Image (cartoon, rainbow, N blue to C red):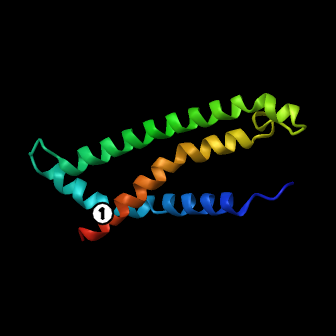
Amino acid sequence: MPRKPSRSRRAAGALAGNLMLAPTVMALRAPLLAAEAAKLDPWRVETSRAVGEKLAAATEGMVAAQLSLVRSSSYFWLELWGGRTPSLLNGVALERAVHAALKPAGRQVKKNYRRLRKSD
């Protein structure tokens, strides 16, 4: 099995590190959400922010994954004529698409961690 380039491994490691912060972000956010639920205030800032961020990251991830697959599809014949196995057939295209889909969520989790950690 061919070895992945170090840039790809670093990017995967950074993404995994960002996503590993998700339980911490949930733990930091839980008291804020509980406090908002106890109030009768209709303007629940943290709740609205949490939902909005998740929807934006999910949408951005879906678009990034689709663009990644379109890019891989456009290289299909070039890879085949070049004597290589097309990335759509060997799984590389799906790996790139998954990484592209998760990247916005990882960025958002890291941003939330920094913001919520400062508010303590």
In the picture, residue 8 is in which quadrant? bottom right
**Quadrant of res 2:** bottom right
**Residue 34's image quarter?**
bottom left
The residue under label 1 is 115
Helix, strand or loop at mark 1: helix
- Amino acid type at circle 1 is Arg
Q: Is residue 38 above or below residue 113?
A: above
**Residue occupying the point 87% across, 54% down:** 1
* Residue 1 in the image: above or below residue 119: above
Query: Residue at coordinates 43% horizontally, 60% vertically from top-left?
Result: 23
Front in this rendered view, residue 31 or 21: 21
Q: Is residue 44 left or right of residue 99?
A: left
Q: Tell me the residue at 44%/55% (across/down).
A: 107
Q: How many marks?
A: 1
Horizontal placement of 42 versus 32: left or right? left
The residue lying toward the viewer, choosing from 51 and 111, is 111
**Horizontal arrangement in the rendering, residue 77 relative to residue 117 (left or right):** right
Residue 44 can be seen, yes or no: yes
Task: Specify few, some or many for label 1: CA neighbours under 10 Å numbering under 14, 14-19, or 20 or more.
Answer: few
